[in-house]
Each structure stands twice: as structure tokens, then as C-alpha cells.
Amino acid sequence: MFASSVFVGLSVLVAPAAAFGAPGVNCPATSPPPPMSMTAVNPCAGKKPRDASPGDGYFMNVNCTTELGVIQALEQSGANITVGYMGGIDATAQGRQPVTTTLFEAGMCPVNVHWHLGTEHYSAGEFDEFGDGPVDGGNTNVGAGGSRRALAPSNARLGYRCRHYNPADPKFTTPYQWKHCTNMVIGETYEVHWPHSAAGACGTPYQYQTPFYDGVFCRDGIISLAPLNTYLKIGVHGQVFTIVNDEAYYYPDLIRGMIVDGEMGADVAKYTGSTTGTSRSNEVCSRYTPITWQVDRKCHMISASSFDKMCADMKAQRDDMSGDFYPHGSRELVADHLAADNLQRV
């Protein structure tokens, strides 16, 4: 848990605002955050915070527990989002509830989009240990200690997979000529994340940033640890897809946020957790917590061309997003004692 002393002297932690996207198919319209004044220099560059107080390294990864078993970080992600799941951290008793409106209605905009190989979340019957995918990328390899790694150049850790894959169906196996995204495999499962922030450079050419932390913390004076408001000002949309070579599954604006169309975006788990990635585990925890997560429990098929169009849109952004043109590794599923007890289906 956070000791109260870590908040001493910290009035505000902010960075230039990053937005998930303008209103549209992916993002319900409402009043956007106030605009930033424009500048020729990227106002979000280098805004990723390291310290809460000068030199304290507060936001560096930390051992999840002490030698005596005391938990040293707040709730983590990605977690089990199956209906009825409850983690062991008493976020509810501490008054930490996720944003249950749309993130846009909460004053946030998307500031980045990136994706992970396989899934970091677990949804029983949708993306779980019984999922399947192509073997040619090495993605079914399970190494020592249960470490699942792809043999792709990035050697990214493979998370869970969906159950759509059918090697007898050509849409799961026909190669696609990728023009913008890299290290992508037809038939594979990917979990897409759209980080949102009320402190983003919403509605400006600098809205989308890589790394996403620069976008999340772009604007000063909005995000605070004392009083704690991170889970009200920072959110992430998550949606899981199996990539197919079939234009019937084309969606043109994937950069803008979670797709809400029919079953897509209809069953959304909402909870508080942390940032993810393979630098964290059940031994090493993220201190970028708590934030709101809103994750679609279902797995959907989407065309490879949809992803390639998204990468083309990323290339058109003012900031260099080339660090996110490929799938990142997936963090191992968060253990029960490190997950929040506030999972909601609203």
C-alpha cells in the first residue's frame, strides 16, 4: 500500500493532455476537455514522470511485496475480467471506483494506441488458456516456468489467445502484405490499448504520443496524488481481436478508440488497476496506479487492413509513434492478491 508520507509535498502531477480521439463511431460525443494553446514544439515531450518529489524515483517499478509479504503497490493490471471475479485488494473500501461513464464523458481523450501479443487480460470462454493461434510465428512456444514467448524478432511474451482460429479457414491463414504495421501475423490474437487522459493535448496535433506516458501526463495541474485522482483522470480502453485476412471485418478508424458496434464494446468490464507490460510481473509491480480500465470481455475478428490503416494513421501524427507499430509483449496475468475487488459490469 502507499504510505501517506509519499504524498507529502506533492500537490500536482501532470503532463500535456493526451486524447483518445474525437467523437465518432468509436467515441461518443460530449464536451471535450479545454483546448491547449498551440506551439511549434511538442508540449508533451518528456512528460513521463519519474519522481513524485524531486529525486525520489517514486514511479519506478517496485517489488510487489516485502520479504514479510506486505504489498507495496496498489492494484495491478491486466487482471481476470470474467463476470463475478473479485481481486484481493480492497479498493472498494478505500473509495477507489472505476469511471463507469464513457472516458470521453469523464473529460478524457485518447493519447496513444498500442497493442500486445496475445492478451494481458483473461476472460473465461473468450481469451483464456484454451485459445489457439498460428504456429508459424512460434507463438505457441511455452518455455521454462510457463514463460510463453514468440520466436518473432521482438521475442515478445505471448499472452492468452482467442478461440476463433481455424487453420482450415483461409481467412486465418492467407498472408497479408503489411505496409505499415510490423511483426504481425494473420490468425493471431492481439489486445489493443487506447490510453486516455484528462491531461492530454486533446484536439491538437500533439494529442497522440509515444511513449503514451508523455500523452497521459502532458498538461500540468490536472493529475494529482494528493488528493489522489489518477483513476478519475486516466483511463484505458482495451479490446481484443483475432486478425483475419477478410475485408468483411474492416473498420477504418481503429486509432480513435474502442469499437462500439453490435457485440463490439457491448460487454465491458470496468475496474481500477495499473499500467502493464513485460517489465512488470507478479513479483515486480507498476507504481502508475490506480487508473480506470474499461475492457471488452469479448474477442472479435478484425481485418488485417484495419490494423494497417491504424498504423498509417499513427504515421500521420505529429509525434513519432514508430515505437508502437508492432505488438508489445504481454504481462503475465495479475495474481488475485494484487488485483482490485471493484470489477464492475456496467
Image (cartoon, rainbow, N blue to C red):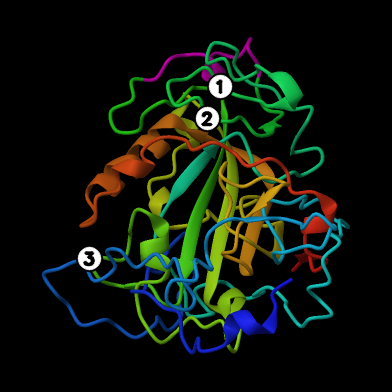
At mark 1, the secondary structure is loop
Q: Which of these two is toward me, 277 or 22? A: 277
Which residue is rendered at x = 76% and y = 53% of the image? 81
Number of numbered callouts drawn: 3
| Residue 33 in picture, x, y percent from top left | 39, 82
Q: Earlier in the sequence, mark 2 or mark 1?
A: 1
| Residue 97 in picture, x, y percent from top left | 72, 76
The amino acid type found where label 1 is placed reads Ala
Label ID, residue 150: 1
The amino acid type found where label 3 is placed reads Pro
Which residue is rendered at x = 58% and y = 38% of the image? 241
Q: Is residue 27 among what the camera can see?
A: no
Measured in 3D between alpha carbons, the distance from the residue under mark 1 to the one under mark 3, in whole angstroms, is 35 Å
| Quarter in which the C terminus is drawn | bottom right
Residue beneath disc 3: 205
Label ID, residue 156: 2
| Residue 177 in picture, x, y percent from top left | 33, 20
Q: Which of these two is toward me, 70 or 34? A: 70
Q: Residues within 10 Å of mark 1 (few under 14, many from 20)?
A: many
| Quarter in which the N terminus is drawn | bottom right
Judge left or right: residue 173 versus residue 78.
left
Q: Is residue 314 among what the camera can see?
A: yes
Q: Are marks 2 and 1 in contact (CB under 8 Å)?
A: yes
Q: Which residues are magenta?
A: 166-176
The amino acid type found where label 2 is placed reads Ala
